[in-house]
Image (cartoon, rainbow, N blue to C red):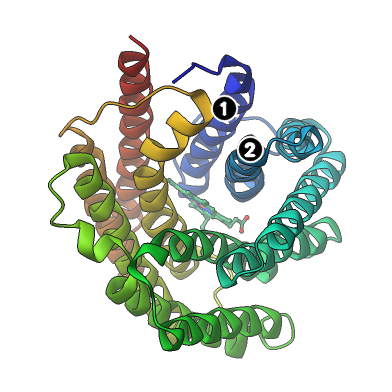
Amino acid sequence: MKPQTRFIPFLALAILALLLALWAGLLRLGWSLPSFPNLALAHGPLMISGFLGILIPLERAVAIHHKWMFAAPLASALGWVSLLFAPTFGMILMTIGSLITFFILIVMVRREPAIHTITMAVGALTWLVGNFFWMSGFPIFQLVQWWMCFLILTIGGERLELSRVLHPTPRQIRIFSLLAIALLTGTILSMVNANTGARLSGLAMLVLSLWFLKNDLAARNIRHTIPLTRYIAYCLLSGFVWLGIGGALQLIYGATLAGPLYDAVLHTIFVGFVMSMIFGHAPIIFPAILGVPINFYPAFYSHLALLHLSLLLRVAADLTNQVELRKFGGLVNEIAILMFLGMTVYSVLRGKK
Ligand code: HEM
């Protein structure tokens, strides 16, 4: 493998967005820390359109390698930096980043018209629509279903693609497609009837999580002889469980606007599902982008276990309204993410040697 250092600036900007978003997350939890105007409010956009808005299109641009495609992670990166100083300009740039990502997905669908590419393209479209509402002045709690749908469909499409080796039956594919359509319908509906929309999306998430637990490749790889493959399977399966928990919470509580319930619904999906997927995906994506193999260490399990335990604590605190415990759970969530970052950088550097 030949090391590819030219993508490092993109990765560095994605990681910087994540670190700032984590800092902002602590502010939102009520930790009194140094800050500057716009930072706390930028937490969600920094995570979704900054950190992930760079990584997701970057992975596609590196794989397909058309120069124009790199404009997507570039716009997202310039967007998050601008967001902190000139919010309107930042919103426009981030929306442009999602628009170019949608174009990349159209190229992918035209190359390979299949359920998994279409699912990912619809995912990119929901990110674009969500950003458009955000840019038009809608509050985040009203459009956050679009950002959730973006990440669930993007990850769902990728998992479907990788699970093709198991030759899913037409019936399994039909059920997956129906669930993706239900999720999208719930998201659209949430703009006119927030409660019904959120409940429908929640139901779709809950059943989708059961679908993944049964049909995803991870269910088979949990007993794999290769330790890295087994670790990835644990990340994925635990992420699917959180998707189900988040879906169940949305189904029960409907739309949430702010406060502990909002925190629980959002972060079962964003931390429990999305972060677990990132933990499992990193050993594949970093070698692909950097051209460096990654070494597996059993210590990888420590950040995975810490993430789940601290999230369990945070959600329990949210549901029982215990402010200090929630602050602590959120802090330990962040420690787990920082441990993951540290371990990943370490194993990439070791892989280089
Ligand atoms: C891991 C540590 C994290 C902490 C401590 C944290 C903390 C918070 C807090 C306290 C809120 C406000 C909830 C409320 O209204 O009470 C929030 C909102 C939000 N978070 Fe996080 N979060 C974390 C991770 C993430 C991740 C990984 C994502 C996305 C991938 C994310 C996306 C969001 C979004 C979109 C909102 C809504 C923002 C808004 O309404 O302005 N968070 N977060």
Between label 2 and label 1, give the one nearer the viewer. 2
Q: Which element is circle 2 on?
A: helix
Where on the picture, by quarter, is residue 292?
top left
Does mark 1 have its CB less than 8 Å from ligand 1?
no
Disc 2 crowd rating (10 Å Cα; few below 14, some 14-19, many 20+) is many
Identify the residue shown where x is 51% and y is 83%. Answer: 179
Q: State the residue in front, 253 or 259.
A: 253
Real-space Cα separation, disc 2 to disc 1, in angstroms: 9 Å
49 with respect to 350 (left or right): right
Q: Is residue 349 above or below residue 155?
A: above
Q: Is residue 262 above or below residue 99?
A: below
Residue topped by disc 1: 11
280 with respect to 61 (left or right): left
Identify the residue shown where x is 70% and y is 57%. Answer: 111
Q: Is residue 134 above or below residue 189?
A: above
* Residue 205 percent location from the top left of the image: 45, 77
* Residue 235 makes an appearance in the image: yes
* Residue 119 percent location from the top left of the image: 60, 69
Could you tell me the amino acid type at mark 1? Leu
* Residue 321 makes an appearance in the image: no
Work out whether mark 2 precedes mark 1 in sequence or the reverse, and give the earlier one.
Answer: 1
* Residue 214 percent location from the top left of the image: 28, 76
Could you tell me the amino acid type at mark 2? Leu
Disc 1 crowd rating (10 Å Cα; few below 14, some 14-19, many 20+) is many
Tell me, yes or no, whether the two marked residues, 2 and 1, touch with CB atoms within 8 Å.
Answer: yes
Residue 58's label in the rendered image is 2
Where on the picture, by quarter, is residue 258?
bottom right
